[in-house]
Image (cartoon, rainbow, N blue to C red):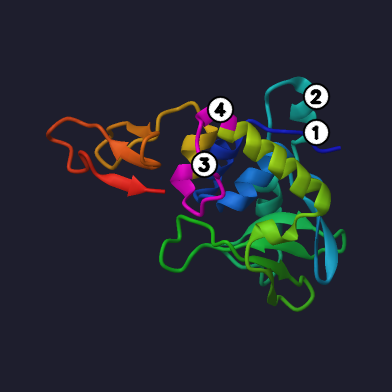
Amino acid sequence: MSFPVDIKYITETERKLGVKFPPSYVTRMVTSNGGEVQTPPDAWTLYLIFDTSDKKRLKRTCNDVVRETQAASNWPEFPPDAVAIGANGSGDQLVLIPQSESPEFLAHEVYWWDHETGELNKVADDFGETCDARWSANTASAAEALRARFRCFPIERSDYNVFRLLTSSAPLRCGDGCAFRWAFRNNALLCHGLGSCSHRSSCFSL
């Protein structure tokens, strides 16, 4: 049975892996840590995000994304920078790979790694495409809760930092360390730093 996970544990997983997950994957795991997704040619059991909030969850999530990725990396021909996020029970892995232009971010595309041939096969343009109807219903509920909390318009944004703002109580900061503030009037993020901030009064439109 899958269960929600606090986003801080996803952030910690990202720190250990040295990459940032795509927004659709983060959204899915925050609401439902684990479970199954469907893609051609198989069903995949998702690896969990390590959750230390209590002893029960600690035990249930110990074989997490980090540990499974480390184990998969020992296979011949496993892509060196790939992150394993699920398996089909036969040795094949569901993986995310870094963006070529920004390797600190994992790309939106989802791949099936064939352990027999070593080949990567794209199975979805975005992780959100793998989710079943039950997850879609959960997503809708989560989105409504976020809209109510932040009094904002739809949250289905591709921008990673916007998602972080909407799902974390921690302030989002600009490149100079100044905190952004959600501007309710014009649906934009504004930097309200001091005069020395190079981003001061910059508008990051949503």
Nearer-N-terminus badge (1/3): 1
The answer for how far apart the CA atoms under marks 1 and 3 are is: 36 Å
Secondary element type, mark 4: helix
Secondary element type, mark 3: loop
State which quarter of the image contains the N terminus.
Answer: top right
**Residue 133's x, y, as percent?**
82, 52
Residue tagged by mark 1?
Answer: 60
Residue tagged by mark 3?
Answer: 153
The answer for how far apart the CA atoms under marks 4 and 3 are is: 11 Å
Secondary element type, mark 1: helix
Say whether residue 25 is visible: yes
Start and end of the magenta stretch? 148-162
Foreground mark, 3 or 2, reads: 3
The answer for how far apart the CA atoms under marks 4 and 1 are is: 30 Å
Residue tagged by mark 2?
Answer: 56
Nearer-N-terminus badge (2/4): 2
Seen at 81% across and 71% down, the residue is 40
